[in-house]
Structure formats: C-alpha cells, structure tokens
Amino acid sequence: MGIFSASFYNYQNPMRTPPKAAELGMTFPEVLVAILLMAIFSGSVFELNAVCLRYIDSSKESVAALQSVHDRAEVLRNLSFTDLTTAATVQSILATAANSSDFCKKATESVTIGAYPTANGTTQFTRTPDGTVTLNSTATDLGTTLVEVDVLTSWNMLGGRARSEQTSTIISNGTKK
Amino acid sequence: MKLASSQKSSGFTLSELLVTLSLSSVILGVAIICGISLQKSFNATDNFLATHIQQVRIIDYLNRDVKRGLIVTTSVNLQSVTMTLPSYLIQTGDTEALANPSLVGTPRTPTISYTSSGWQVNYGASTTSVVYSINGSSIVRIENGVVTTIASSTDQLVPITTDVDLANTEYASTSVTFMPIFNLAGNTADRTGTTLYATAYLRNKRRG
C-alpha cells in the first residue's frame, strides 16, 4: 500500500495500525466547532457589556425626558393666562429648548392646550429637534379660567425603539404669586 | 495480520503537553479577565445608576425649596444656594402660637395684600433659611442650622445652580454632574456626559 495510504483510515482493513498521535491534526469540523465556541463565548461577553451600556443609556434618557417635560411645564405654568392662551406667544416660547441637555436636541416635543374641564378644541404645537415649532391646531375657545396643558416628548432609542414621556397640568387664571 | 498497537501505550509527547498547557493557560486567562471585566462593568453600571438617582434626589429637593421660596441666591462659584422660605407652619413663639399654643405645627393662614407691583400672598413676617452646599463628598441641606445630607457619593457630585431674576418672579436652573468610575483621567467630557438639567420657578412673588 505504501507510505501514502498509511495516513488515511483504511476501510477495507480496519485492523490496520492507526496513525500515531503525532500524526493526528485537528479535523476541519473540530476547528469549526472550536471557533464557534470561542465566538459564542466572546459574543456573550461583548453582549453583556453592551447590555450594561444600553441600560445606562436608557436610564439617562428616561430621566432626561422626565426633566424635559417638567421644565417645559414650569415655563408654561409661569406664563400669564393671556400669554398661555395666545398661540403666537406659546409658539415663540417653544422655539427655545426645554433645557440645555443633549436629549432635547434629539427629542420631538408636543404641547397641547385645552379648556378645562370641558375642552372646546385644543391648541397643539409640535417642536422638532431642530427647533422648528409648528402650530398643528387652534382651539375654538380656551376659556378664561382653567386650561389643561399636556406636554409630550418623544424620541427614538438606540436601535430605533420609540419612547415617550408625558405630563399634564391644570393652570388657572389669576394672581399666582 | 498484526493487531493495531494499543492506545494506552501512546501517551502525549512533552511538546504536546506544553502546547496544550500553554493554550489552556491562555484560554483560562482570557476567561478570568473577561469575568473580572464583566464584574467591573456591572459594578460601574450599578454605581452609575445609583449616583444618577442621587442626582434626581438633589434636583427634587432643590426644586421643591425653590418653588416654595421668596428669595433664591447663589454663591459666586454657583455651588451653594441660599433660599429664604416663608414659615408655612406656625412655630413656637409666633403670635398665633402665643394666642393659642395648640396651633403650633399647623399651617399658617396666608393673607393677600396689594403692593406697588401687584397682589401678593403673605405668610407672616418670620422666614426660614435653607442653604444647599457641598460638604466633602456629600450634598447637604441646612434649614435653620439643621443639617440634612441629601446625597452622598464618592463620584464627586457637583450641583451648579444659576438664579435668574424676572419682573416679579425668579427661576433657578440647576445642572448636576458627577465623575463616573470609568473615566479617561478625569477629563471634563466624562463629567459632561452625566449632566442632568432642571429648572424651577418661584411660586411666590420674588421678594429680593
């Protein structure tokens, strides 16, 4: 049979001397399995680390969103009732971001004002991340005593998941100081 | 026909053992390093979120007092805030308490008066002083000399408050930062990435 065939398993003669250990390399499937196991292990480590980072990012965004809607509500609440019920004034105020955070530079804000407790149409504004404010609708009548102000901020998380945060407040006419 | 030699008689060569040991050591070392790194990552995440919550607590405390305040002033370095609050509750020694001691601790009935700048709500002449400042690694609130630690962290929490006077009101813009465990030699950018912003307006008419 010669030296050449000695390195192969002989199916016709299974009693033949098996190759020595030193001659045994790793087979291709063995290498693939080893690489696969290492890849799974490495992938798990990286993924766990990425989950930690995403968790922090998500938490930071949630808190920043909460502060953003609170800050916007604070500004609107401090307006005189006349200014609050004048669309042009509110539109002008919304041009400025709720606060200086990076979050406000990527979130879309929506403010809805309606008479309370019974709305007669609502005045709604949308502020895009670039600071453009659009008047979407105008209330038929906002009344002269109470309005409900809804502030909604929405954004996309890393990975594209849509998220939002909202707050509502009732603001009255009259002296607040 | 000769039988195949027994596997038992064919052991590993020294070089095979050395290579195996080397590879095993490398793999074990990598696994240990990965484990330690993951543990550090988890600790850093846990620490970051814990400090993040402390930021929220500082903002909550500060904004609550700003909203109740009559006057808000900040120090030159913006890290200390002093507020004057009305005494919303009747205290021992107040006129109402002298007339009726059982009123101590109950809410004071406000009065409304007209001033040159419009109507204002009054809660009596006595006021309460509240100061927020940094004391070591803690943020403390001092109300009439009573110290309360509202946040404590080794992550160098720093609140910066700016007060802005308006016609008859005032607002305080606060940003709180800290230095996370994983940072690049304490670069400013590491701190900037942790900033939490908040704004609060006085509910009372500004008196100062």
Image: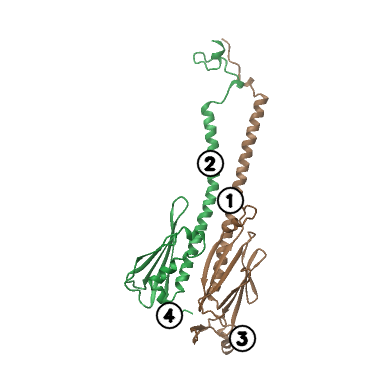
Q: Nearer the viewer, mark 4 or mark 2?
A: 4
Measured in 3D between alpha carbons, the distance from the residue under mark 1 to the one under mark 2, in whole angstroms, is 17 Å
Helix, strand or loop status at disc 2? helix
**Which of B183/B107 is in front?**
B183
Give yes or no for contact between labels 3 and 4 (Cβ–Cβ under 8 Å): no
Relative to B6, residue B17 above or below:
below
Colour green maps to chain:
A
Measured in 3D between alpha carbons, the distance from the residue under mark 3 to the one under mark 2, in whole angstroms, is 69 Å
**Residue that label 3 marks:** B93
Mark 2 chain: A
Measured in 3D between alpha carbons, the distance from the residue under mark 4 to the one under mark 2, in whole angstroms, is 62 Å
Check disc 3 and give the amino acid type.
Gly
Q: Are marks 3 and 2 on the same chain?
A: no
**Residue that label 2 marks:** A43
Q: Are marks 1 and 4 on the same chain?
A: no
Does A137 sit left or right of A98 as displayed?
A: left
Precedes in sequence: disc 4 or disc 2: 2
Q: Which mark is residue A174?
A: 4
